[in-house]
Image (cartoon, helix red, strand yellow):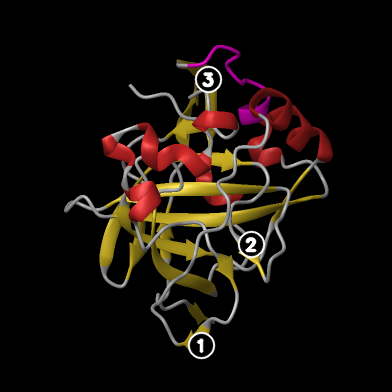
Amino acid sequence: MTCWGYTGVEGPDNWGSLSPDYATCAIGRMQSPIDITGAFPVKGPALKFDYKPSSLKILNSGHTLQINYAPGSTLTAAGEIYELLQFHFHVPSEHAFDGLHTAMEAHFVHKNPAGVLAVVGVMMEVGTQNHALAAVFDNVPTEAGIEVSVAGTTVDASAILPTATTGYFHYKGSLTTPPCSEGVHWFIFPDAIEVSAEQVANFERMFGHNARPLQKRNDRLLIVSS
């Protein structure tokens, strides 16, 4: 597998040339993340979350902390049902609002039966400790490529979402890591959740900054639904 990272010759500016499989990172015109600004207001369909608690399985991918989710939790958007596969984190946030980033961003990755991906982006700002994520941050595998199952512990993805999930931004984009595949439905909440400075620092100590720079929007439509 081709090595990639966030600094130096393996960094985002060079992803497209590291492997033919990563070419979309350089030539794609629907890349993520983007700056959330100038959105077109519409009355979009409500997002329906049916998240259930899952046994806690944590993967240190070498690039981020990934929580692999048990089958059976779904997101319904515009009549399409997507199953939650995993969620993971970036420091600082990958998306920005009018050029401003938050301390962290969580990505909830879903897939529908046709293989189409939908990712929900949740901004995370420094405040009080996030108790819903305490077990996650307290059990980080120190070795890359290792998945740890935390016995007798569950995680509830619904407790990590913002209180308000009716309003959202939506656009068509890509994965924010190689191979940067396009056709991803992005849903970004305007409201942030809180994490403590210690939780952010502990993540950053292990993974450093793992955010891809902002990409050109080109002629894509960005909508905001309230």
The mark that comes first in sequence, 2 or 3, is: 2
Indicate whether 220 appears above or below 146: below
Indicate whether 110 appears above or below 61: below
Q: Is residue 204 left or right of residue 70?
A: right
Which quarter of the picture shows residue 69?
A: top left
- The numbered disc on residue 55 is none
Q: Nearer the viewer, mark 2 or mark 3?
A: 2
| Magenta span dominant secondary structure | loop
Which secondary structure, mark 3?
strand
Q: Is residue 130 left or right of residue 40?
A: right
Q: What residue does disc 3 label?
A: 152
Where is residue 71 drawn, in percent x and y? 31, 38
Name the one closer to the observer, 120 or 173.
173
The mark that comes first in sequence, 1 or 2, is: 1
Q: What residue does disc 2 label?
A: 96
- The question of residue 139 being in magenta is answered with yes
Which secondary structure, mark 1?
strand
Q: What residue does disc 1 label?
A: 41
